[in-house]
Image (cartoon, helix red, strand yellow):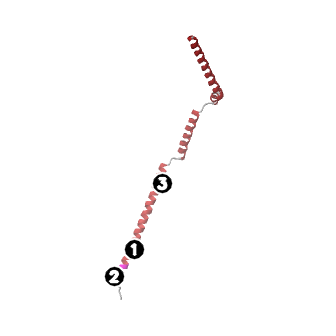
């Protein structure tokens, strides 16, 4: 019966095949670890999103509260129509204003002339 005695080349090829097999297993392990790490990061990110989210009804409540505050501020700064109309009625036109100013100027000029005439009469 013939027995084969492995030679060095065969030993080297066998060892090389074993190493390649081991490397393949290591690569698979690293790849799985990588996938696990990515999945863990995704889970952490999802959990963080969930933690920072607020329920829709709370969001809507906050939004309605802000709208209400804004509406109250608008109402607070508004005046009634009657008050507005009264203010408009108290206003005068530009022409009326100019006429009134000219009337005051005229009255002042008249008063000034009267005083001047009194002073000149006294001096006479």
- Which residue is at a point 57% across and 33% down the rendered structure image? 77
Q: Quadrant of the N terminus?
A: bottom left
Residue 46 tag number? 3
Instruction: Tell me, yes or no, whether the highlighted magenta stretch contains residue 96.
Output: no
Please tell me whether residue 42 is drawn above or below residue 27 in the rendered image: above
Please tell me whether residue 86 is drawn above or below residue 33 in the rendered image: above
**Position of residue 118 measured from the top left corner of the image (x, y, whole percent):** 58, 13
Closer to us: 98 or 11: 98
Please tell me whether residue 67 is drawn above or below residue 123 in the rendered image: below
Asked whether the viewer can see residue 10, the reply is yes
The magenta-colored residue range is 7-13
**Position of residue 85 measured from the top left corner of the image (x, y, whole percent):** 65, 29
As measured in the structure, the alpha-carbon distance from the residue carrying label 3 to the one carrying label 1 is: 38 Å
As measured in the structure, the alpha-carbon distance from the residue carrying label 3 to the one carrying label 2 is: 56 Å
**Position of residue 106 measured from the top left corner of the image (x, y, whole percent):** 62, 21
As measured in the structure, the alpha-carbon distance from the residue carrying label 2 to the one carrying label 1 is: 18 Å
**Position of residue 22 measured from the top left corner of the image (x, y, whole percent):** 38, 71
Judged from this view, the residue extending furthest toward the front is 124
* Crowd tier of the residue under label 3, counting other residues whose Cα lies within 10 Å: few below 14, some 14–19, many 20 or above: few
Closer to us: 115 or 62: 115
Q: Which residue bears the numbered disc 1?
A: 20
Q: Quadrant of the C terminus?
A: top right
- Which residue is at a point 45% across and 60% down the rendered structure image? 38
Asked whether the viewer can see residue 90, the reply is no
């Amino acid at each position: 019966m013939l027995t084969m005695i492995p030679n060095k080349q065969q030993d080297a090829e066998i060892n090389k095949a074993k190493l390649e097999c081991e490397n393949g297993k290591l690569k698979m392990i690293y790849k799985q670890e990588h996938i696990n790490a990515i999945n863990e990061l995704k889970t952490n990110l999802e959990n963080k999103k969930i933690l920072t989210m607020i329920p829709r009804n709370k969001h809507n409540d906050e939004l309605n509260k802000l709208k209400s505050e804004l509406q109250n501020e608008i109402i607070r700064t508004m005046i009634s129509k009657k008050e507005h109309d009264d203010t408009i009625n108290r206003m005068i036109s530009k022409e009326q204003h100019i006429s009134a100013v000219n009337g005051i100027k005229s009255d002042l000029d008249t008063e000034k002339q009267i005083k001047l005439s009194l002073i000149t009469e006294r001096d006479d």
